[in-house]
Each structure stands twice: as C-alpha cells, then as structure tokens.
Amino acid sequence: MSGSQPEVATFAAGCFWGVEHIFLKHYPIAQNKGILRTSVGYTGGKEDVASPTYRQVCTGTTDHAESVRIEFDPSVVKYDELVEFFYRTHDPTTKNSQGADVGTQYRSAIFYHSPEQEAVAKRVTEEVQKKHFDSIGKKIATEIIAAGPWWDAEDYHQEYLHKNPSGYQCPTHRLHW
C-alpha cells in the first residue's frame, strides 16, 4: 500500500449491480489498479428517510439513488479517471433512467466528497460533453451534488453479478467508447 490516504468516489448510473460490476471488471481489486473496496447502497434521498430498504427505494418515494461507493488509492488511480470511466459505462443523457430501468433511483449522479472532487467532476463532465455528446446533439443530464448520508444495500446486492453471473444486467452498462 502506498502512502496515500484512500479517497471515496460515489456514483449513481442505473441499477447498482451493473455499475459495481463494470468498475470491478476493469479495476479488479486483486490487480492493484487503484480500487480498494466497493459497496452498493443508497444515497441522495430525503433526509427524513434513514436506512432505506431496497423495496422502499424502488417505490421512488424516498428519492434515493442506487449508488456505488468506491474506496480508491489516488496514487494509483486518479479521481478524474474514475469520473471519465463512470461516463463511459452508462448513458448519462437520459434523466432518471438507464435502458428499461426508469425512476429517480436510476438517475445518473456524481456525489462529490470534497471541493476538489466537485471541481474535477465538473471539468470532466464538460470534457466528455464536448468530446462525445455535442457532435450527436445530446446533453449530459448527470447531477453533480454533495455526498450526503450513505446506507449500504442489503448483503445480497453486494457484488451481485459476481455471485450471480447470469443475473440481470442493464444493457447500458458497457464501454461506450
């Protein structure tokens, strides 16, 4: 382990199973590519809803997003690289949906943990917009907002697609470029 303090990145990009899976597929923990640990859970919801369940979040009434929390070593992988990868692996131009998954829990969002992360997220968003979406006339709809309370999802959701390789995977969770 290097001398760098681990940082946290939090992303929402549709069904959290696929988001966690594609990050771990391209940044396997065992290969020391910078990701130290992941968990799927819920964030960005109403303040008066603590410890929401999957069933509650799926109703759309709590406003939580299915999200992935990534602990990473910034001396191995930079935050801007993770933000760009986040954009590569889903459709950030659709509001509150990914593929057939529709609802606020499937929105595209970057939950930043510091002013530095906010600045990087905004810069990378502008770069990705210019490079990949201006030419096709689409606009990134991703929210960039301060990280709030985090709740881990139920155990069976953690690394779901590693445990259930034939489980549901949203078709937008692939490399788009």
Image (cartoon, helix red, strand yellow):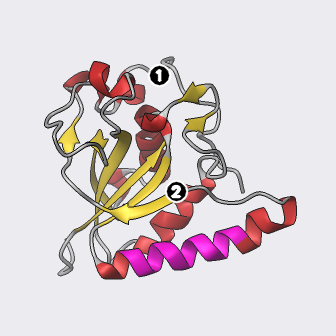
The percent position of residue 109, horizontal first and vertical second, equals 46, 54
Count the labels in the image. 2
Placement of 93 over or under 97, stated as above or below: below
**Crowd around label 1: few <14 · some 14–19 · many ≥20 (10 Å):** few
The stretch drawn in magenta includes residue 119: yes
The residue segment tinted magenta is 118-129
Q: Tell me the CA gap for discs 1 and 2.
A: 21 Å
Q: Which residue corresponds to the image point at 50% horizontal and 52% vertical from the top-left?
A: 26
Q: Secondary structure at mark 1?
A: loop
The stretch drawn in magenta includes residue 146: no
Q: Which residue corresponds to the image point at 42% horizontal and 32% vertical from the top-left?
A: 17
The percent position of residue 163, horizontal first and vertical second, equals 35, 23
The percent position of residue 161, horizontal first and vertical second, equals 42, 27
- Give amino acid for label 2: Phe
Q: Which disc, if any, is residue 35?
A: none
Left or right of 152, for residue 105: right
- Give amino acid for label 1: Pro
Q: Which residue is denoted by mark 2 in the rendering?
A: 86
Q: Secondary structure at mark 2?
A: helix
Q: Going from the N terminus, do you reach mark 1 or mark 2 first?
A: 2
Q: Which residue is denoted by mark 1 in the rendering?
A: 165
Q: Using the rendered view, name the quadrant where residue 3 is placed.
A: bottom left
